[in-house]
Amino acid sequence: MRKVLVSLLGFVLMSVVPGTLLAEDPDAPDLKVKLLVQGQAQFTEDANVTKDGWDNEFFVRRARVILTGKVNKWINFFYETENANIGKNGSFGDFVFTQDAYVEFAMYKELKVSAGMLLLPFSHHNRQGATSLAGLDYHNVFSGKFITDKVWRDVGVEARGILFDMLDYRVGVFNGLRGTDISKQGGVTLNPDDMPRFTGRLAVNFFDVEDAFFYGGTYLGTKKVLSIGGGLDVQPDAVLDAKGELGLYKAFTGDVFADYPLNETMGITGQLGYVYFDRGYDQASTDVFDATTGKTTKAFADTFAKNAGTGMGAFGEVGFRFEVLKVPLMPIVGGEWYNSDVDGKDITNIRAGVNMFLKGHNANLKLEYANLGFELPKKDAAGKVTGWENDSANQVTLQAQLLF
């Protein structure tokens, strides 16, 4: 009991006074306080108000306060705030929220149990920490396609571990879409029995194991990794089928990740992933304006159309790390593709850049050029949409990262 009280007192003190509380005794409480800041200068073609010139944006991509530590050698914790895109599009609203908050009981390397607000154990890429990415940012083929999430997080319990010094398993039970607080589709309530969500991942590590809670995007020569894995995300009665009946939400992924040091100053980092999401169908509706009340309501039809989050995609990247005047550089190329079952929602992005790791992941600069592909509607003389055509815009982004 005394150790728990000491830990709580240390947590309060270190929340007020930045720094690090170090413990020589491995069983003593420990707390570390970190700050992440990622600033970006971004220039996007035809993204200004008149859509005929370059949009210039300077903003803070991420600003996080991170608390990590342990109560004793068996119990550790992680807490992180997020304040994303400060100043983007001129917005300085209150964006601060709790992004990660969990306690982990690390009994053995074969079994660790975490509870709280957790990053979903779905794919290698979405489980990577934003501080250690090889590229500028995530290959964003997940957002808007999970059944529900808060920046790919959900509240629940997860068990993970390393078996036979090579098999990495992570499986969890989460809230998912709750029947007590969800939208209704023409009077049909999704997940009326509050069934839980199940998410899991299984991977094989052929060299070094990845036993940390967050995967690395690149280990900068500190690990030799080759991981092949797959993930599953399901929740009963969380979507509608083509007839409007309750159905199973499901998502699958498969990926390969490699981070291979060639010598002390050179290495190759790469990954390739595939995703499939089935978000079911949405009931067709039209907006009805009531002139008497001045309110607009939805009138639901008897037909159903596929949700825009249903579809398949792929993403990948490969980078080569080397040193120039003892400064590690990494040219990197990659991209993402997503084919939605709903017209007009496809994306095809191509990316190329170079990273300068001034002090590893603690201080670095990343410059990226991207060609962002999307679909635009084709219209006839009367303004009716007759099809879709591909278009794209160029974008250049410079990011500075500090983690200390």
Image (cartoon, helix red, strand yellow):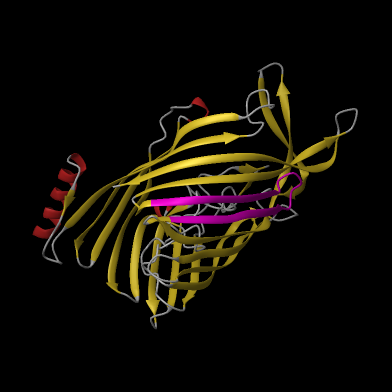
Which of 358 and 205 lies nearest the eye of the viewer?
A: 358
- The image quadrant of residue 71 is bottom left
Looking at the image, the residue that sits furthest to the bottom is: 164
Position of 18 compared to 99: left or right? left
Q: Residue furthest right?
A: 381
- Would you say the magenta stretch is mainly helix, strand or loop? strand
- Magenta range is 329-357
Q: Specify whether residue 78 is in view.
A: yes
Q: Residue at x 30, y 54 (%)?
A: 78
Q: Is residue 56 above or below residue 220?
A: above
Q: Is residue 11 left or right of residue 265?
A: left
Percent x, y of residue 12? 17, 44
Q: Say above or below: 194 vs 267.
A: above
- Image quadrant in which you'd find residue 324: bottom left
Q: Position of residue 166 (x, y in %)?
A: 42, 79
Where does residue 18 sit, x and y in percent of width and height?
20, 42
Residue farthest to the left, as pictured: 2
Q: From the viewer's perspective, is 196 left or right of 333?
A: left
Q: Nearer the viewer, residue 325 or 51?
A: 325
Residue at image x 70%, y 46%?
345
Residue 345: in magenta span: yes
Looking at the image, which residue is at 37% across and 63% down? 213
Indicate the position of residue 16 as horizontal and vertical percent values. Answer: 18, 39
Where the N terminus falls, by quadrant? bottom left
Q: Is residue 74 magenta?
A: no
Q: Who is closer to the viewer here, 345 or 320?
A: 320
